[in-house]
Image: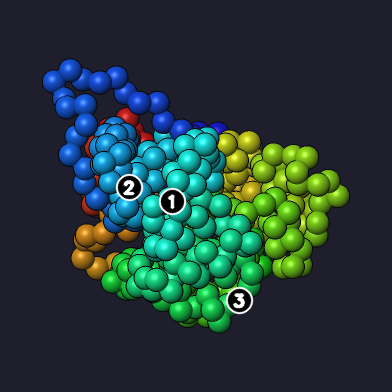
Amino acid sequence: MTRFLLFIMYLLLFPAAVSAQAGHIDYPPRVPDQPLFPQPRQVPMLSDERLAAEKYAEQEQAWMKVLKNDGSQPEYWLNVYRAVRYADALQTGSPVTVLRRERLDSLVNAMPQVCRNSFEYYYLAYLNSTNDPALFPQLERAYELAPERPELNREFIFHYAVTGENEKLKPWLTRWENHFRNDSAVQQYGHNMLAGLETGAVLFTGSETDAFPVLAEQQLRGYRTDVLVVCLAAFHTDGQLQQFLVNHELNEPEHSYTKNTQADFVQEIIRWNPKRPFYFAASVEKKILTALQQNLFVTGLAMRYSEPGFSNLPELYKNITAVYRWNSGSPQAVYWVRQLEMNYVLPLLLVAAEERKKGNTAQAKAWEDKALAIATKAGRKNDVKKYLARGG
């Protein structure tokens, strides 16, 4: 199979890495037999449940109607903000691009007039800043007011990962894992991602989706600390990212990051550090992956950057058949974990196809069945069945 087809399959089968950061939505036309303002419901965190894009649009309208009658309740504002932000994340598939900035800013800027001294205000003020370290005291204030809120995990992990304060990072990673009931599938994912990388690798991730399981394996269990994890969504400015890479002994490109796209900058980093192997996780923005596609090769849970060409099938086969752990237990109930495991599906199908070429029909069927089982838990069974029906 050609490198280009591998890449297209990667984008089609791997789930979009949605996060609390992103861009734009065009409201669907109103259906006449539906109420203009549906009943408001609590908008769940994306890690717990994902609604359809039109449902987020409906909830935005519903909660705005509530706010017009009573703006004193901070949780109402949080629900509106989530409805806007999560719809945008689904629309763009981007963990960092924000196109509806004025809409989000207007919500946060209006809150101090009615509910300043609240967890929701301080949390959203920091979240809306996209991890601005100057506003970190706002996040700390949110923690003081409601220390057990799970929303805090993401932002504190991002902050301490960027600043390199590992002793402060560890308890937040523990809290994050506990939110998923110490799910063995999460730990296994982080272990497998790291196990499939070469020594001294640099792993780019787009959001917490791939980054947090890996960081937990490194910081909490001391596994593969030679790998540098670069979570692109964690950085407030281009310069902050550039300084982070320099602090971790990567050579700095001679051109300023601000003069290039992020994809250009990443490629410059790779070229200025030829002795380091570079990998990209599924959560990296598609526009970056697309810009680099001619040099990306699927090797398992990550894609390796290589120029010139690279024979990826031996490394992919080794990771799937000999390196990765496959001891995940019962079906997972948490939405986010089921979606995370979908990132195994494409590598499994590619290995199955190689087994069939070699005449190993039984082994090919076993890998296909594993891919189907994962896809079934994630609600994507039909996608995999259609792929297999086309002959892989």
| Residue placed most toward the observer, 373 or 161 | 161
- Closer to the chain start, of discs 1 and 3, is 1
Residue 93, by quadrant, is: top left
Which element carries disc 1, helix, strand or loop? Answer: helix
* Residue position marked by numbered label 3 in the rendering: 165
| Residue placed most toward the observer, 138 or 308 | 138
Question: In the image, which disc is placed on residue 71?
Answer: 2
* Residue at x-position 42% and y-position 38%: 88
Instruction: Indicate the position of residue 389 as horizontal and vertical percent values.
Output: 27, 32
Which element carries disc 2, helix, strand or loop? Answer: loop
Whether the residues at callouts 1 and 2 have beta carbons within 8 Å, the answer is: yes
Instruction: Indicate the position of residue 1 as horizontal and vertical percent values.
Output: 50, 36
The amino acid type found where label 1 is placed reads Gln
Question: In the image, which disc is placed on residue 113?
Answer: 1
- Closer to the chain start, of discs 3 and 2, is 2
Q: Nearer the viewer, mark 3 or mark 2?
A: 2
